Image (cartoon, rainbow, N blue to C red):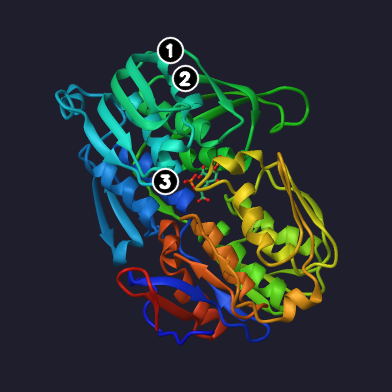
Amino acid sequence: MTQPAVKIEPAASTVTRVCVVPGGPVEGKIRPPGSKSLTNRALICAAFASGTSRLAGTLVSEDTEVMIDSLAKIGVSIKPVDGGRTLVVEGVGGVVSDDARKISSDAPVEMFIANSGTTVRFLTAALSAFGGKYKLSGVDRMHERPIGDLVDAIAPALDGWIVATSDGKCPPVDIDSNGWTGQPMRVGGGVSSQYLSGLMMAGPIASKPIRIEIVGEMVSIPYVRMTARLMKSFGGTCEWEFDGDEPWSGLRSVTVGGSYQGCEFDVEPDASAASYFWAAAAISGGSVLVEGLDENASQGDVGFARVLETMGCEFIVRDGGIEIKGGPLRGVDVEMGEISDTVQTLAVVALFADGPTRVRGVAHNRFKETDRIGNLAIELRKLGGRVDEHDDGLTIHPLSSDAQSSHRHDVVMETYNDHRMAMSFALLGLRIPGIEILNPACTRKTYPDFWADLESLTGRSHTWTTNRIGGARAS
Ligand SMILES: O=C(O)C1=C[C@@H](OP(=O)(O)O)[C@@H](O)[C@H](O)C1
Ligand SMILES: C=C(OP(=O)(O)O)C(=O)O
């Protein structure tokens, strides 16, 4: 560091920058926190179930807190045990009751959903099926993230009205509903799979089978399969119709039904979070075992470990987990539409490969916490290499050996309040000294303890930097 720095706790609001300290191969094992996607799905199904559910291994983070706080507003009791890593949920039952509607008969129930895509999309569907008056709003970026395809799917089949009020049909979302009519729905899935997942989970709340037709392509299909698998645990049913022989690429419709019953549900560790630790092994030439995940996991992002294998790493299944051993890295041409949350991780790994890496099929990454194609390219270019931006992805060219080995005190990585920018850029520090990452606390969205977990895995302390009041840099 050119300036002296202090070591303080990452959670402190005064921390404005972090610099990860390199130091050879990363070796060890880790169990990431619970999956955000599974936690928020399980909360929806448990909330609208009859009876009590016990959800074990749940994620404690901003995205799950906004879901919990919102459900509490319609009378769902959610009791944290074990620091929130187990949640005991008393469901309100799926059947729309006059009592439930009375909760919001006058003013709308206001829910704050921060920048959580799963929360706003799943709740929009579930609450419109449940009935009542609601207003769902979030942070500025959330008001730029599209929800039009979901609102347009619900509106014609709603006894009531629903509208997304920001430009381009983005949240806030206003709902005034007496429930779904039972009419079939049609949903577009080219921007996000969360619309279909939300409608599917809401089906059993509507208490009559609903046919949902898929219009055009569907991105992030593994999350749709995850939805179906999780619904089954709570008593929901899904019947699929496909065009042609290729089941998932020819997805045409799903009819959802059943009713939710409380149950005991185990949440897997988060596979997107695991990507950072597998990547740490890949780029440092070390080996990292991620515990609690295997290829039968319901999260498609475990597939990221196979991409690393294609790049030259060793993929080992052992001790109830997947281990990645780093080796010389090859550039790859890879379709990542099914595992788009790991694009930023892969882009960092690709900088250390022996040839260019082309990432395809992730045009929808422009609609996430930030534009994860355009802004990713801008940040990676700061390292001095070449990154080409495409409509559907990126080509990342390897860094020169000079750029890989010199101290880079000149490089400050912007994170755009995107947790995955911060966690991916952390990996750069394992190879290149001096790079600073702004706003490290943005990992709170899905992984508040990320920096501490990285420290314990690497056995090295990062360097934290604070700002004086007024913005001047201080030690
Ligand atoms: O359903 C889910 O849990 C998710 C689906 C994906 O979103 P898209 O379907 O918008 O790609 C993913 O990026 C997000 O982090 C979680
Ligand atoms: C895209 C993400 O989240 P969400 O869409 O749920 O806000 C993510 O976690 O990378």
For label 3, being within 8 Å of ligand 2 is answered yes
Name the amino acid type tagged 3. Answer: Ser
**Where residue 224 sits in the image (x, y, percent)?**
57, 37
Q: Is residue 234 left or right of residue 177?
A: right
Local secondary structure at mark 3: loop
**Where residue 263 sits in the image (x, y, percent)?**
37, 47
Local secondary structure at mark 2: helix
The image quarter containing residue 22 is: bottom right
Task: Determine the CA span between mark 1 and mark 3.
Answer: 26 Å
**Where residue 73 sits in the image (x, y, percent)?**
22, 40
Name the residue tied to disc 3. 116
Q: Nearer the viewer, residue 426 or 89?
A: 426
Name the amino acid type tagged 1. Answer: Pro
Judge depth for marks 1 and 2 and give the one in front: 2
Residue drawn 70% across the image and 47% down it: 336
Q: Earlier in the sequence, mark 1 or mark 3?
A: 3
Local secondary structure at mark 1: helix
Q: Residues within 10 Å of mark 1 (few under 14, many from 20)?
A: some
Asked if one can make out residue 296 in the rendered structure from this viewpoint, the answer is no
Q: Is residue 268 left or right of residue 343?
A: left
Judge depth for marks 1 and 3 and give the one in front: 3
Q: Quadrant of the C terminus?
A: bottom left
Q: Earlier in the sequence, mark 2 or mark 3?
A: 3
Task: Determine the CA span between mark 2 and mark 3.
Answer: 20 Å
Q: Disc 1 vs disc 2: Cβ atoms closer than 8 Å?
A: yes
Asked if one can make out residue 347 in the rendered structure from this viewpoint, the answer is yes
Residue drawn 64% across the image and 75% down it: 288
Name the residue tied to disc 2. 152
Name the residue tied to disc 1. 156
The image quarter containing residue 172 is: top left
Q: Nearer the viewer, residue 120 or 430?
A: 430
The image quarter containing residue 421 is: bottom right
